[in-house]
Structure formats: C-alpha cells, structure tokens
Image (cartoon, rainbow, N blue to C red):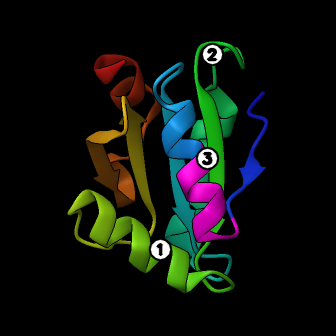
C-alpha cells in the first residue's frame, strides 16, 4: 500500500530533495478533478509492491499547490504535465512520466 505524504510547500520540496540522497523519491503531481489523473493514481496504488524503506512517495495536489508544481518544473527542468510522476535520487530527477505512461512497471524498470 502506498503511504502518500503530502507535498504542500517549496520548503518541503527542499527536504524531499535532501532525502533523495538516502532513498529514491517518487512525486506524483495529481489533479483531483482529472479522470486521467485519478486512473494513474489508482493504477499505482492497486499494483504497489515497494516498502516505505525502498521508495518514499509524495502526492502534490496541483489545484491547491500549483506554485510548488512550478518550482518542481523549474528545479528539475521538466515540462509540467498532469498527471506526472518524477523519480528523484541524489537531488536530481532521473525519470519522469505522464498520463498513461505512469505504471508500476515503469517505476520498477527505472529503480
């Protein structure tokens, strides 16, 4: 089961980046009013196989925290999409995917 931690501020993003030096981090940029976003989130949750000490997971509500999403796009030089996952390790985004490319198989392949 995924234990989503909320990502609600740029300060939290800084902490997450620091954590990524110890453990890989997945950020899901999620729109609560988008059916594709809901499907992407559900597909990850239904098939999840990682433990909390293998991969940390964060959920960014795009409607409430768009400025954080903008900071993520700038910080990692990643074009903003929704839904979107970003895989962060050692302070860098080493993988991103959006829409129906968000799958557990994709996450497993890049970890």
Q: Which residue is mark 2?
A: 49
Residue at image x 58%, y 38%? 44
- Relative horizontal placement of residue 109, taking residue 32 as reference (left or right): left
**Distance of label 3 from label 1 (alpha carbons):** 15 Å
Closer mark to the observer between disc 2 and disc 1: 1
Closer mark to the observer between disc 3 and disc 1: 3
Residue at image x 78%, y 27%? 1
Of the image marks 3 and 1, the number of the one nearer the N terminus? 3
Q: Secondary structure at mark 2?
A: loop
- Relative horizontal placement of residue 27, taking residue 41 as reference (left or right): left
Residue 14: name its quadrant.
Answer: bottom right
State which region is magenta.
8-15
In the displayed structure, would residue 29 be above or below residue 86?
Answer: below
Residue at image x 40%, y 28%? 107
In the displayed structure, would residue 3 be above or below residue 53?
Answer: below
Q: Secondary structure at mark 1?
A: helix
Q: Is residue 40 visible?
A: no
Q: Which residue is mark 3?
A: 15
Q: Secondary structure at mark 3?
A: helix
Q: Which residue is mark 1?
A: 69
**Distance of label 2 from label 1 (alpha carbons):** 26 Å
- Relative horizontal placement of residue 34, taking residue 82 as reference (left or right): right
- How crowded pointer 3 is (Cα within 10 Å; few <14, some 14-19, many 20+) is rated as few
Majority secondary structure of the magenta segment? helix
In the displayed structure, would residue 57 be above or below residue 33?
Answer: above
Closer mark to the observer between disc 2 and disc 3: 3
**Distance of label 2 from label 3 (alpha carbons):** 25 Å
Q: Which mark is residue 22?
A: none
Of the image marks 2 and 1, the number of the one nearer the N terminus? 2
- In the rendered view of the protein, which quadrant contains the C terminus? top left
Residue 9: name its quadrant.
Answer: bottom right
Task: Count numbered badges in the picture.
Answer: 3
């Amino acid at each position: 089961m995924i234990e989503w931690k909320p990502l609600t501020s740029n300060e939290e993003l800084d902490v997450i980046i620091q954590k990524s030096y110890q453990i890989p981090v997945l950020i899901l940029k999620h729109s609560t009013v988008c059916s594709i976003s809901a499907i992407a989130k559900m597909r990850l949750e239904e098939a999840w196989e990682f433990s909390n000490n293998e991969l940390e997971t964060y959920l960014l509500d795009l409607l409430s925290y768009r400025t954080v999403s903008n900071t993520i796009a700038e910080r990692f030089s990643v074009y903003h999409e929704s839904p979107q996952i970003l895989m962060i390790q050692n302070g860098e985004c080493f993988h991103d995917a959006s829409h129906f490319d968000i799958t557990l198989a994709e996450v497993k392949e890049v970890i």
